[in-house]
């Protein structure tokens, strides 16, 4: 990172003295923020350029093709080429052991999601490594620490996968889609409308039967009664909890994919997503039963369930699906375009 220090200092000074340059694109994701209710992204699919900028390593930053990303831990701004950024994102978001075609599908989804995020951001830095708001990112050093003796193998595998699809993004009606993705579905993905309240024609439920074979497809957690009661009382002041514990969670209404849309917690109406967050459940596709001194939550899948299932993508890849077929399975009515050079 030392060899880029001069460039970063120069870049930061430059940003203080010139107007913010145009960076058009657009939003997702495993657990990314939902699409905005007003879908008003304007995207040219063009990479940013800085007029007159002199790069220390022009070979690495050919044609000024790079993204500005804030390290959410250090608050420093990084300038990364699409290849560098996407390799770090795929490494953070999907196991490197997955099939190469699944990794390619993840790279295209990640790139599409990044462009949409960029299109919704007015000032640099346009992206962040904060996984709570943007996509996660692993630096080369973090990848080496995570992969250990497999570093060379996985680094080469991910780099090659990203290089093959780096200029491909998914669009609908001319704009990058909200390319949501998650770890494991319940066997059928969810609609954006059921999770975020906004219907999107490319984020509709599809079958994903390979998820049933995934490790962690079904998980259970037993929470003590006192812990559940305290959480409910804090989340819903004034809630009435019956002496009959079987009535603490009742009237569960489910989507066609099986996720809990609404339910009664005590005498309070709430949502499956709210209960999932309250008790740290892996998904909103759950059942809950009173057990010995507590409540047993059983969950299917992991994540919000919208868009591409990552384990489902790996399963399809191992059945011979290409990255294009994987993506068009999970994202309906989309087309692929090359980013502008």
Image (cartoon, grey):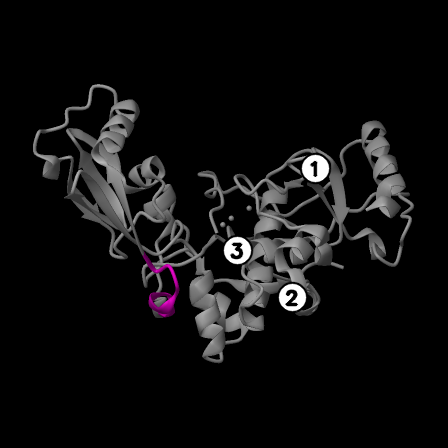
Left-right relation of 56 to 22: right
| Rendered location of residue 276, percent (x, y) | 32, 41
| Rendered location of residue 7, percent (x, y) | 87, 42
Residue occupied by mark 1: 125
Decide whether residue 224 is among the magenta residues: no
Residue occupied by mark 2: 150
Q: Quick one: SS at disc 2?
A: helix
Left-right relation of 7 to 238: right
Q: Quick one: SS at disc 1?
A: loop
Number of marks in picture: 3
Question: What's the distance in space between the residues labelled 1 and 3, CA to CA?
Answer: 27 Å
Q: Is 173 in front, or is 235? A: 235
Relative to 176, residue 230 above or below: above
Residue bounds of the magenta highlight? 210-218
Residue occupied by mark 3: 173
Confirm or deny contact between disc 1 and disc 2 (CB under 8 A): no
Rendered image quadrant of residue 4: top right
Nearer the observer, disc 3 or disc 2?
2
């Amino acid at each position: 990172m030392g060899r880029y220090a001069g460039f970063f200092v120069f870049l930061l000074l430059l940003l203080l003295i010139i107007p913010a340059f145009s960076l058009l694109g657009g939003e997702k994701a495993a657990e990314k923020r939902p699409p905005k209710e007003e879908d008003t992204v304007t995207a040219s699919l063009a990479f940013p350029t800085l007029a007159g900028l002199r790069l220390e390593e022009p070979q690495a930053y050919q044609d000024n093709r790079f993204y500005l990303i804030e390290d959410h831990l250090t608050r420093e701004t990084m300038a990364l080429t699409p290849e560098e950024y996407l390799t770090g994102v795929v490494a953070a978001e999907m196991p490197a052991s997955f099939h190469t075609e699944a990794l390619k599908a993840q790279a295209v989804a990640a790139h599409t999601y990044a462009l949409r995020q960029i299109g919704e951001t007015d000032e640099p830095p346009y992206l962040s490594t904060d996984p709570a708001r943007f996509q996660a990112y692993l630096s080369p050093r973090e990848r080496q620490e995570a992969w250990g003796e497999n570093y060379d193998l996985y680094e080469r595998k991910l780099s090659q996968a990203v290089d093959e699809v780096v200029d491909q993004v998914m669009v609908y009606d001319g704009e990058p889609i909200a390319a949501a993705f998650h770890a494991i579905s319940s066997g059928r993905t969810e609609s954006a409308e059921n999770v975020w309240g906004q219907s999107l024609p490319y984020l509709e439920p599809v079958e994903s039967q390979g998820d049933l074979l995934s490790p962690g497809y079904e998980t259970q957690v037993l929470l003590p009664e006192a812990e559940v009661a305290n959480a409910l009382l804090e989340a819903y002041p004034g809630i009435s909890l019956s002496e009959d514990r079987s009535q603490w969670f009742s009237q569960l209404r489910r989507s066609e994919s099986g996720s809990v849309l609404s339910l009664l917690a005590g005498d309070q109406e709430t949502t499956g997503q709210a209960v999932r967050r309250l008790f740290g459940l892996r998904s909103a596709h759950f059942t809950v039963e009173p057990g010995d001194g507590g409540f047993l939550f059983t969950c299917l899948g992991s994540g919000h369930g919208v868009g591409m299932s990552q384990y489902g993508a790996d399963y399809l890849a191992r059945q011979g699906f290409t990255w294009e077929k994987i993506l068009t399975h999970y994202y309906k009515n989309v087309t692929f375009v090359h980013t502008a050079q």
